[in-house]
């Protein structure tokens, strides 16, 4: 948000007191000054005290002006505002350079204006006031300069105090309405050092806390983008989703934005004040600050010129000056090895579980369409990946078609596995408030490759909970029915060809009771493109080759497919499956029969399953996960050897058997010797 340095160019007609204003700011008094001062650099530490002085003087002047109409409600608003003022120093650049100019050197003036961050425009009488709209503003626009301008009416000590208020309205309002570049106007006196610090503060604030992105001074309303951002803030702070901020929620918001909690008295006074403006006919029954009330509260700040408070709220929720969320917040640095995968951490699981329970208003265990739309209100909408995966048909839903907690967590696991950056982005949108969103994710160990007898294969994995499986096979082999049975335990007899890739994910229970997530992906007409894409194949943990055991032409498709992409597929663990096993088995018209084919590849024989046989389906899914976790036993062309432990056991058996044989021979020899001795 902040920048390293800030250039303030002071300009205006000759003799309006530009150099005197700068001198009064630095020395707090006027001495004989030269015609044009050299550039003056002020470090941030030097003028933070000036801001404190300004805030204190503002507090005192406000108290005096409102002495007749003083109220506790005004006190509460003022204290809320003061907190915003104190936070301005957080965004002050490390140095500010003040550039004095003269209108007689136009070339140098134009050069400085193009390098400026803010313009401090000074006038002192009626003639120089008229030249603001007739000369200076047209000149700025002709130069293509679109910078915030602080208009300063100098030499206020020459005017009577009684005429100041009327004159301010007569001079400032027409210019503000005509020129959107003018963000603030102030009347000051370099001679008496009146409002000089305030004018300098306003120059700083136009850059650190600009009013133009959030408030339309002509209309007198907050701008639509600001309203949208504040509505999102309100939505995230409304923890119980009852449409109102109660005291606890408001106090948490206040602490997050301004570093301290609000008191109940302040909350009640603010609530009463804003509700009087929104609901003037209601004297009671308002249970908290509504969304409209929250917007009204921020509008009051803008009208009072206290937009530091608005920016304090917006920046606490990571909004930039353009009212978009900060990219560093949405996409934090997260180092992931290309051979690793990303999964939800326990913190991430807890966040998404809490989010589900929070928006399941009817407590029916499912998110209906309205509840989902409400949940995604603070986001750009449902993630693109969800649309591509045809959510919610990609997960387990209840009988009414609502998203269950099981399916909700599965979908976020799918998103994290395939596109973790999208998960990070939506964690930010949805209000993950654990410092940085990367805490919601974890990275698995990098997948390693081994080599045996010139054959590469993947090393076993033991720290992953999500596995991705490609389903390959001829048309009408039963791939779509397999996916349907995986999700819902049933399938349709009607054949519908798969055109676009289709994804589904579900948690399954392995032997021993451990849970993991299995992604099944049917490639459709994109099969060739995906199998030629190495990055997509790297995401695949296991391939399920399917054929219709009742169709004699079905298996040949797999043989030809593997011949075409052998160099791409041979390192990926594979499981062959004969689908539709409940129908009559047919001899395959293929160069080699399935059992012989898999034997030649040193992998298990095809599993014969049917979507109508539930137990066989569960066994298939377990074997797919086992193949992904222990690739060495399911990699095509990799000859398996006895396990090291089995070799040790065999060695022990051989040694024991040898020892017994030796003992037997010795015993027989001793017995014969004793018999012969007895005969003699």
Image (tube, grey):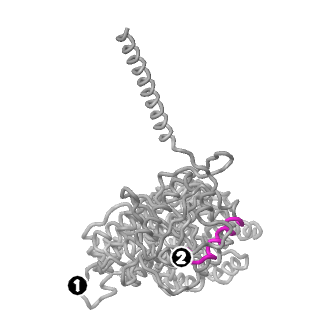
Could you tell me which secondary element the residue under label 1 belongs to? loop
Residue at (59, 86) in percent of width and height: 178
Which stretch is magenta? 548-564
Q: Quadrant of the C terminus?
A: top left
Q: Quadrant of residue 367?
A: bottom left
Residue at (54, 83) in percent of width and height: 171
Q: Which residue is mark 2?
A: 389
Q: Are marks 1 and 2 in contact (CB under 8 Å)?
A: no
Expressed as whole percent of the image width and height from the top left, the position of residue 81 reads: 39, 69
Q: Which residue is mark 1?
A: 285
Expressed as whole percent of the image width and height from the top left, the position of residue 200 reads: 54, 65
Q: Is residue 663 above or below residue 505?
A: above
**16 or 584: which is nearer to us?**
584
Number of other residues with Cα within 10 Å of mark 1, as a class: few under 14, some 14 to 19, many 20 or more: few
Q: Is residue 384 visible?
A: no
Q: CA distance from mark 1 to mark 2?
A: 46 Å
Q: Residue furthest top?
A: 680
Q: Residue furthest front?
A: 679
**666 or 395: which is nearer to us?**
666
Q: Would residue 407 appear left or right of 364 to someone viewing this image?
A: right
Q: Is residue 621 above or below residue 646?
A: below
Q: Would residue 119 appear left or right of 519 to someone viewing this image?
A: right
Mark 1 or 2: the one toward you? 2
| 495 inside magenta stretch | no
Q: Residue furthest left?
A: 284
Query: Mark 1 or mark 2, which has the lower sequence index?
Result: 1
Number of other residues with Cα within 10 Å of mark 2, as a class: few under 14, some 14 to 19, many 20 or more: many
Expressed as whole percent of the image width and height from the top left, the position of residue 45 reads: 51, 52
Q: Quadrant of the N terminus?
A: bottom right
Expressed as whole percent of the image width and height from the top left, the position of residue 658 reads: 47, 28
Q: Is residue 670 visible?
A: yes
Could you tell me which secondary element the residue under label 2 belongs to? loop
């Amino acid at each position: 948000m902040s920048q390293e340095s800030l250039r303030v160019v002071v300009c205006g007609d000759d003799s309006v007191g530009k150099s005197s204003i700068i001198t009064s700011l630095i020395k707090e008094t006027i001495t004989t000054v030269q015609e044009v001062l050299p550039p003056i650099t002020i470090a941030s530490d030097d003028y933070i005290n000036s801001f404190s002085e300004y805030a204190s003087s503002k507090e005192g002047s406000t108290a005096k002006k409102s002495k007749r109409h003083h109220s506790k409600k005004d006190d509460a608003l003022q204290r809320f505002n003061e907190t915003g003022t104190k936070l301005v120093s957080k965004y002050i650049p490390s140095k500010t350079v003040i550039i004095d100019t003269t209108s007689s050197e136009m070339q140098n003036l134009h050069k400085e204006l193009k390098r400026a961050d803010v313009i401090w425009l000074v006038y002192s009488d009626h003639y120089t006031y008229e030249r603001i709209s007739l000369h200076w503003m047209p000149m700025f626009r002709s130069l293509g300069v679109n910078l915030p301008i602080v208009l300063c009416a100098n030499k206020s000590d020459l005017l009577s105090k009684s005429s100041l208020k009327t004159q301010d309205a007569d001079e400032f309002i027409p210019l503000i309405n005509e020129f959107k570049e003018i963000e603030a106007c102030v009347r000051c006196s370099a001679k008496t050092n009146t409002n000089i610090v305030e004018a300098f503060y306003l120059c700083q604030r136009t850059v650190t806390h600009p009013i133009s992105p959030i408030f339309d001074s002509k209309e007198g309303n907050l701008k639509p983008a600001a309203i949208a951002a504040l509505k999102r803030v309100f939505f995230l702070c409304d923890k119980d989703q009852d449409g109102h901020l109660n005291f606890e929620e408001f106090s948490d918001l206040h602490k997050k934005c301004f570093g301290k909690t609000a008191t109940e008295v302040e909350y009640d006074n603010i609530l009463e004040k804003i509700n009087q403006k929104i609901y003037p006919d209601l004297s009671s029954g308002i249970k908290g600050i509504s969304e409209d009330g929250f917007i009204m509260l921020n509008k009051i700040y803008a009208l009072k010129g206290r937009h530091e408070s608005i920016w304090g709220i917006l920046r606490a929720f990571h909004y930039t000056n353009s009212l978009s969320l900060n990219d560093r917040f949405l996409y934090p640095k997260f180092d992931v090895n290309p051979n690793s995968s990303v999964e939800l951490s326990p913190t991430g699981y807890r966040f998404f579980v809490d989010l589900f329970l929070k928006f399941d208003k009817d407590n029916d265990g499912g998110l209906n369409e309205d509840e989902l739309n409400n949940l995604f209100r603070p986001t750009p909408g449902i993630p693109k990946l969800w649309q591509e995966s045809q959510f919610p048909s990609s997960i387990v839903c209840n009988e009414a078609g609502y998203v269950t907690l099981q399916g909700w967590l599965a979908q976020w696991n799918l998103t994290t596995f395939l596109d973790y950056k999208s998960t990070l982005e939506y964690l930010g949108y949805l209000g993950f408030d654990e410092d940085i969103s990367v805490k919601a994710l974890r990275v698995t160990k990098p997948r390693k490759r081994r080599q045996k007898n010139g054959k590469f294969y993947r090393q076993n994995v033991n720290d992953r909970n999500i596995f991705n499986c490609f389903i390959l096979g001829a048309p009408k082999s039963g791939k779509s029915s397999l996916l349907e049975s995986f999700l819902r335990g049933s399938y349709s007899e009607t054949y519908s060809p798969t055109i676009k890739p289709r994804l589904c994910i579900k948690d399954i229970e392995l032997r021993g009771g451990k849970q993991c997530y299995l992604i099944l992906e049917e490639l459709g007409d994109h099969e060739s493109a995906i199998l030629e894409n190495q990055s997509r194949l790297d995401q695949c943990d296991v391939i399920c080759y399917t054929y219709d055991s009742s169709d004699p032409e079905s298996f040949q498709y797999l043989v030809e497919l593997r011949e075409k992409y052998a160099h791409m597929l041979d390192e990926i663990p594979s499981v062959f499956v004969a689908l539709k096993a409940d129908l009559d088995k047919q001899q395959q018209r293929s160069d080699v029969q399935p059992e012989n084919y898999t034997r030649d590849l040193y992998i298990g024989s095809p599993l014969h399953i049917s979507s109508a046989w539930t137990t066989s389906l569960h066994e298939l899914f377990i074997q797919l996960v086992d193949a992904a976790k222990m690739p060495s036993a399911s990699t095509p062309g990799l000859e398996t050897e006895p396990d090291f432990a089995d070799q040790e056991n065999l060695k022990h058996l051989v040694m024991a058997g040898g020892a017994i044989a030796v003992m037997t021979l010795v015993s027989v020899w001793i017995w014969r010797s004793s018999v012969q001795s007895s005969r003699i």
